[in-house]
Image (tube, rainbow, N blue to C red):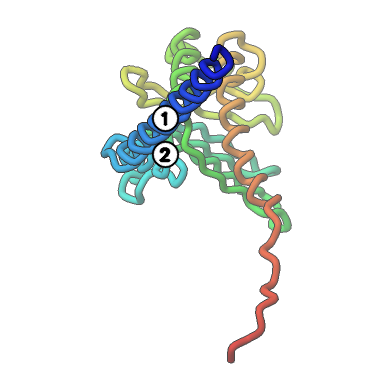
Amino acid sequence: MHATRQRRWGSNWTARRTGALAAALAAAALAAAALLGSPAVAAAAGAAAKAKAGPAPEERRVAPVLTWSVGHPLWGALSFTILPHGYATYDFKPARKDRPPTLATKMLSAAQLKALESTLRKHGVCTIVSKRKVGIPDESRPTLSLSWKDLRCAINLWDGEWRDMPRAKEVSAALVKVMEEVEAEAKKAKKKPAAAPSTKPSTK
């Protein structure tokens, strides 16, 4: 009798466990179906797709909040811009005609924008001024122009000043870091393998 009661209890426990598991799976399936059809999930998916593709053409016509520009007759011209929504463009045109230009774009994250803005404010970017009237021979003069919230100024320093002046050095280092991340997008595109030729027979 004791053995029979044990078997019956074990059978009932197994049935209860199986039923509970089936109910949990059914509830999970219903929740997933509801989630996939919810406006919130659709909106999140749309936002992710937009961030990957970048802003619409009309959104790219707004004035940039940050522009870094520098040119030199020996090596070329570089322009780097960031739009209000974080869309960044790296555009380098070499002076030599036998070298290809580099054009790269990337949607910066909110964290990247916040970190860059924090660095600009921390070092009082709009109060940085050049200490030299003339540069050394062949020295370029990069310009940083800002229309970022209340940061509205243009900083025009000789190349050596951007490297040697402590506050300017920190600002330029932060800019170079972001520019290199955007430029890397162009390098990734060059490394993508070409599509393999189709092996399907022609239907013509």
Mark 2 vs mark 1: give the one in front: 1
Give the position of the C terminus as an image quadrant.
bottom right
> How crowded is the residue under tag 2: few (<14 C-alpha within 10 Å), some, or many (20+)?
few
Q: Residue at the bottom extreme?
A: 204
Q: Secondary structure at mark 2?
A: helix
Q: Residue 3 occupies which quadrant of the picture?
A: top right
Kind of residue indicated by mark 1 = Gly
Alpha carbons under labels 2 and 1: distance apart: 39 Å
Establish if 40 lies above or below 166: below
> Looking at the image, which residue is at 61% across and 11% down?
165
Give the side of residue 37 with respect to residue 164, left or right. Answer: left
Q: Please give the name of the residue rendered at 51% of the width and 39% of the height, measured from the top-left corner.
A: 106
Give the answer, above or below, for where 119 lies relative to 30. above
Which residue is the site of mark 1? 19
Q: Is residue 149 visible?
A: yes
Residue 141 placement (x, y as % from top left): 58, 29
